[in-house]
């Protein structure tokens, strides 16, 4: 004699059994968990930022030495023009991070400018 199929598990309510049946039918989310991770572009942006900072530091150092060269050259020829140029380039170098060479360029350019304007005309 055949027995009818059970309609539920003894001791389990019918709503819990229906929820577990619904949960077992939805398996499409597992594919997203197994997919390869998407590369993040943030690392590339950080590398570019580091490269820009290194280029900016190099450019600041070159501006500092250029200002220093102009300021030293102004001690010997055209003190007003080259001294002012040394001060301006030294200031730009200090803004870009080359504080020592930019400061020296400003100082030497200012001394040369003062000597050229106030002392040289008397000789």
Image (spheres, helix red, strand yellow):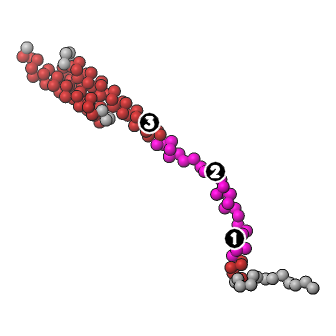
Give the residue pinned by disc 1. Answer: 23
Q: In the picture provided, is 71 more to the left or to the right than 121?
A: right
> Tag 3, which secondary structure?
helix
> Tag 2, which secondary structure?
loop
User: Would you call the spot at circle 1 few (<14 residues within 10 Å), some (14-19), or many (20 or more)?
Assistant: few
Mark 2 or mark 1, which is nearer the start of the sequence? 1
Q: Quadrant of residue 57?
A: top left
Distance between mark 2 and mark 3 Cα atoms: 29 Å
Q: Quadrant of residue 71?
A: top left
Query: Which numbered tag is attached to residue 51?
Result: 3
Residue at x 17%, y 22% (from the top left corner): 112
Q: Is 58 inside the magenta-drawn segment?
A: no
Residue at x 40%, y 34% (from the top left corner): 54
Position of residue 108 measured from the top left corner of the image (x, y, whole percent): 19, 25
Give the farthest residue toward the left.
Answer: 122
Give the residue pinned by disc 2. Answer: 36
Taking 79 as reference, is 6 above or below it?
below
Quadrant of the rendering where the N terminus is positioned: bottom right
Q: Main secondary structure of the magenta part?
A: helix
> Tag 1, which secondary structure?
helix
Seen from the viewer's position, the closer of residues 47 and 121 is 47
Taking 19 as reference, is 123 above or below it?
above
| Residue 87 in sight from this viewpoint | no
Q: Which segment did they paint magenta?
A: 19-46
Position of residue 89 measured from the top left corner of the image (x, y, whole percent): 27, 28
Find out whether the residues at labels 3 and 1 contact each other: C-beta distance under 8 Å: no
Q: Is 44 inside the magenta-drawn segment?
A: yes
């Amino acid at each position: 004699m055949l027995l009818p199929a059970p309609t539920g598990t003894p001791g389990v309510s019918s709503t819990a059994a229906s929820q577990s049946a619904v949960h077992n039918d939805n398996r499409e989310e597992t594919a997203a968990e197994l997919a390869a991770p998407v590369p993040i572009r943030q690392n590339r942006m950080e590398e570019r930022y580091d490269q820009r900072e290194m280029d900016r530091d190099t450019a600041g150092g070159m501006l500092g030495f250029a200002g220093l060269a102009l300021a030293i050259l102004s001690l010997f020829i055209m003190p007003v023009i080259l001294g002012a140029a040394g001060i301006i380039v030294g200031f730009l170098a200090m803004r870009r991070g080359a504080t020592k060479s930019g400061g020296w360029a400003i100082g030497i350019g200012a001394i040369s400018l003062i000597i050229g304007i106030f002392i040289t005309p008397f000789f």
